[in-house]
Structure formats: C-alpha cells, structure tokens
Image (spheres, grey):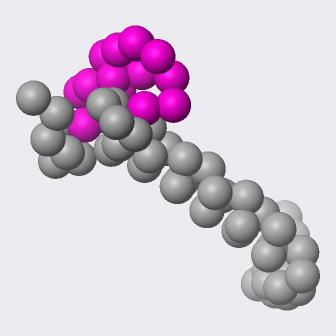
Amino acid sequence: MSTAVLAPARPIPIPVGAILPWAIFAGLICLLAIYFVGAEEGATSMIQGMYVHEFVHDARHLLGFPCH
C-alpha cells in the first residue's frame, strides 16, 4: 500500500472590499433586531398593537430588557 501525504491547506486571503458590504448588511440586521427586541413598544413603536412585543417577549427577558 502507498501512503498519501496531504499538504496543509493554505488560507486564501479575502479582500476587504469583498467583506465590507456583507459586514455592513450584517450590522444593520443586528441593529434592527436589537431595536425590535429592545425598543419596539410604547412611544417608539413603529407597528400598531402588541404583536411584536409578544413575539419577542422571551428574548427581551433573556437579554435583560425590562418590559413590564
């Protein structure tokens, strides 16, 4: 039997220009999620009713946001 020797994989550099749009998009999604979990009720509410509040209610408690 022959023995196969594998060379270590070399990382491929990713240019910052390729990562930047995805990083900005991910940051905006995270900010939107924090808004809905942390501030979507009362005077700052963008959506009428308590639907969003009830949907993210347990996440509010898990992350330490007061809600009642």
Q: Which stretch appears magenta?
A: 45-60
In the rendered image, which quarter contains the C terminus? top left
Write down the quadrant of residue 17 in the picture.
bottom right
Residue at left offset 79%, top offset 75%? 20
Q: Quadrant of residue 42?
A: top left
Establish if 66 lies above or below 45. Answer: below
Left or right side of 57 for 66: left
Q: Residue 61 falls in which quadrant of the image?
A: top left
16, above or below 18, in the image:
below
Q: Is residue 38 left or right of residue 30?
A: left
| Membership of 54 in magenta stretch | yes
> Residue drawn at (83%, 85%), measured in percent from left and top?
16
Task: Return the residue nearer the eye: 35 or 64.
Answer: 35
Task: Quadrant for the N terminus, please.
Answer: bottom right
Percent from the top left, x then y, of residue 13?
85, 87
Q: Relative to the observer, which residue lies in front, 8 or 12?
A: 12
Q: How many marks?
A: 0
Position of 4 compared to 68: left or right? right
What is the residue that sits farthest to the front in this orientation? 43
Q: Is residue 30 magenta?
A: no
Question: Which residue is found at the position 51% from the left and 23% from the top?
Answer: 47
Residue 31 place in picture, x, y as percent = 52, 55
- Residue beneath the point at 35% across and 42% down: 39
- In the image, residue 14 above or below residue 39: below
Q: Nearer the viewer, residue 22 or 40?
A: 40
Q: Does residue 9 sit above or below 48 in this rendering?
A: below
Given residues 53 and 2, the one toward you in this image is: 53
Looking at the image, can residue 26 be seen? yes
